[in-house]
Every structure is written in C-alpha cells, then in structure tokens.
Amino acid sequence: MPAAPPHRSGAASPDARRPAANPWFVDLRELGRRAGSMHELERTLPAPADWRVELIGVPEGAEVHLRLRLESVMEGVLVSGEVDVPVAGSCARCLEPIEDTLELDVQELFAYAGSTTEATSEEDEVRRVEGEHLDLEPMVRDLVVLSLPLAPTCTEDCAGLCVDCGQRLDDLPADHTHEQLDPRWAGLAARFTAAPGTPDADNPEEN
Ligand SMILES: [Zn+2]
Ligand SMILES: [Zn+2]
C-alpha cells in the first residue's frame, strides 16, 4: 500500500481519494453538516470551452483560480471568496486584441435537499447540494459570463478606427484627416479655405 501523500494546507485533500472525479465538484463529507464548520478551498482549474460572449471570453483551458471558503449553515453550504480568471477577446471599437484578468467576488448558498430554502425556491432560483457534493462550475460560469462586457474596449476611451483608412485613430496624429486626398472635393475645399464666406461659392465659372 503506497504511503499517503503529505497533507498540503488549503488543498482539497478529499478529492485525492477520487482522482477521476469532476474537478469542479467539492466533496462535502469532510465539511459535514454541523452548522459553523468551515473549510477553505484553493484550486486552479482549466476553463471549459463555453465561457464567452460575442467579443470576449475565457480561453478554453485557461487557468481559473479559486480561493473559496465553504461554511456549513442551517440551510446548506455558503460558498464565498474570490475567482480570478483570464479573459481574451477584441476591442469593440478598434478590433485590437485584448487580454485581461477578471478578479471576481462570489457568495452563494447551495441549499440542502429538503431545506426550507430548497422547498420554497423555484428550480432555477437556488443552487443545490447534490448528494455529498456540490458543483462549482455552474456558479463560476454564471459569475464570469455575467461579468464579461458586451462591448469590451482596449482602453477606456479608445477612439476606434478611421472610417476612411481603417487605421486605429489612437495610433494616428490628432490632425489625421483624408480631406486633401479626395480629388472631387480638393479644389472646392481650397477655394473655401482661401476665401471663406464667398457669396458665389456655388458658381465655379467665376474662377
Ligand atoms: Zn480599441
Ligand atoms: Zn484615416
């Protein structure tokens, strides 16, 4: 029989007994049901594929870092703590790639089957303890996806793209313009610049 691995503080040791288990599952047998008992959990897990909105999301397999506290309360298990998750996408204004890390706070109750909370809540209103475990993945997915911006920007005041040449306006000089380059208007523009307010502007023959 192999020697037991050394106990690492904070690591989720109960799962070591079930190596094939879903890594998002938390075994509650160690926590127990006595109100007031508490368990700290720190895990780094690979992100599933579907945590995204149109322009930004969590790359599949990216490291999702969980620092959670599980507390046994009368109605179930209160999960609170922090979730750090890398996100990648593109700026809604200039299309530049964006990379960032979201640092999110979470606090949710997982209700026991048969608890008052469970009995008085609709199916989709409350998370539930499933037998001897709870599943963190739906909670973290909802937290992350609801935090993703529908129109992410590379900087708070990204000016977007020049409508004429498609370059990023933030990369161009402040006086970037295409007025001089359009031959249809170049002559007219020069006239207005030379003699602003000319009353016969609509009569080009007078040139
Ligand atoms: Zn941008
Ligand atoms: Zn331009």
Image (cartoon, rainbow, N blue to C red):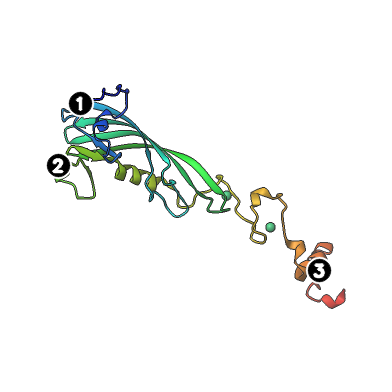
The crowding category of the residue bearing disc 2, from other C-alpha atoms within 10 Å (few below 14, some 14 to 19, many at least 20), is some
N-terminal label among 3 and 2:
2
In the depicted structure, whether residue 28 falls above or below residue 151: above
Disc 1, SS: loop
Disc 3, SS: helix
Q: From this viewpoint, which residue is outermost toward the front?
A: 1
Residue type, numbered disc 1: Gly
Q: Position of residue 95 (x, y in %)?
A: 56, 53
Q: Nearer the viewer, residue 107 or 26?
A: 26
Q: Position of residue 40 (x, y in %)?
A: 29, 28
In the depicted structure, whether residue 78 falls above or below residue 167: above
Disc 2, SS: loop
Q: Residue at x 82, y 67 (%)?
A: 191
Q: Nearer the viewer, residue 206 or 51?
A: 51
Q: Which residue is mark 2?
A: 113
Quadrant containing the C terminus is bottom right
Looking at the image, is mark 3 or mark 2 nearer the viewer?
2
Residue type, numbered disc 2: Ala
Q: Which residue is mark 1?
A: 36
- Mark-to-mark CA distance, 1 and 3: 82 Å
Q: Position of residue 160 (x, y in %)?
A: 60, 53
Q: Residue at x 42, y 47 (%)?
A: 148
34 sits left or right of 11 in the view? left
Looking at the image, is mark 1 or mark 3 nearer the viewer?
1
Q: Nearer the viewer, residue 110 or 4?
A: 4
Q: Residue at x 55, y 48 (%)?
A: 97
203 sits left or right of 151 in the view? right
Q: Position of residue 114 (x, y in %)?
A: 12, 41
- Label number found at residue 92: none
Q: Which residue is mark 3?
A: 187
The crowding category of the residue bearing disc 1, from other C-alpha atoms within 10 Å (few below 14, some 14 to 19, many at least 20), is some
